[in-house]
Image (cartoon, rainbow, N blue to C red):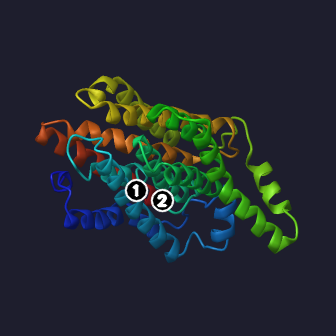
Amino acid sequence: MLEIFRRNRFFNSLLLLPYTILVRVWLVFDGQPPAFNMKGILTDWLFSGLDPNGGLALVLSILIVYLQALMLNRLMIRNRITQEMTLFPGLFYILLVSFFPEYNGLSAPLLANSFVILALDRLLSTHKSTGNVPRIFTAGFWFSVAFLFYFGYIVLFICGILGLSMLRTVKARELMQFFIGFLAPMSIVVMLDYLIHSDITDFQLHFVEQIGFFDIDIPFGWPLYLQMALFGGLVTLVFFNYASFTLKKNIHVQKKINLMYMWLIILFGIVLIQSGIFYEEWTILSLPLACFLAMFFARSRQWLILEIIHFGILLSVLTLQIVTLL
């Protein structure tokens, strides 16, 4: 099965949809789906009336994950970060954001991930010498939209500033362009809040409620320990393979890989500012980890071993989903 997604073909991309349905459809059999926590003002405005038990929430979660997988594949292929043009980034993203039943359904981080991918696509393209004004502005704009869907993603403002500095010799004017792009969506939201409520109390109150310092609400137990083992092991694997990931890559690709490592590190800062850290926060790490896993699998030539590993991961996902229903 893994060999199918090694080739970047249109039909193979379509097959990612039934793959997504396979690992996420179990939510329909669960009488108690994960709570939909409103951790972003746009998430609150747009989805507060959505029933997490309804079929619409399930369909939306499947479609969003599938589209994000396609977007992530496009991001990696356009920037030639992997040695081969594969569909592995999207494949592993689907697996990671569906690995545990607690990740199924909609969540603020899941919604925000779409805009993180858009922002990274613009940011990674700023290494070009010309035409960067719209790219820098748009990168800041999409990072801000991600932040408005999930408060913890405010740390990506730092990622954007440092990322620009890593990819190019950044000028003060370009930093200002990024800053203005980041302010633009917030200005629009404040304006809408004022037009609707005649004040911006809702905007202010929402942000105050989301601020927290090591405010972790995840109960201790085997689900937490399994998730810590999974993501801890993946992060360790990623950092131990830094040399092999950057080996024989041109300077532009090396800079992009370094930016992805910086992105992964900065994401851990979310626990310093976000209140009510819960299971869905683990999915924040899924975007960078899926990219690194794709790089790890794409450079290997041990096809049989890779197929066995992929089958084991897929079987683990399905087992965890089914066991929860029993």
Instruction: Give left or right: position of 6 versus 276.
Output: left
As drawn, the label of residue 321 is 1
In the picture of the structure, the residue carrying the numbered disc 2 is 104
Give the percent coordinates (x, y) of residue 311: 22, 48
User: Mark 2 and mark 1: span between their CA atoms?
Assistant: 9 Å
Kind of residue sitting beneath label 1: Gln
Give the percent coordinates (x, y) of residue 78: 31, 51
Quadrant of residue 8 in the image? bottom left
Kind of residue sitting beneath label 2: Asn
Give the percent coordinates (x, y) of residue 285: 48, 42
198, above or below 226, in the image: below
Closer to the camera, 40 or 24? 40
As drawn, the label of residue 84 is none
- Mark 2 or 1, which is nearer the eye? 2
Q: Quadrant of the N terminus?
A: bottom left
The answer, for residue 153, to whether it is visible in the render is: no
Quadrant of residue 94 in the image? bottom left
In the structure shown, which secondary structural element does the residue marked by tag 1 occupy?
helix
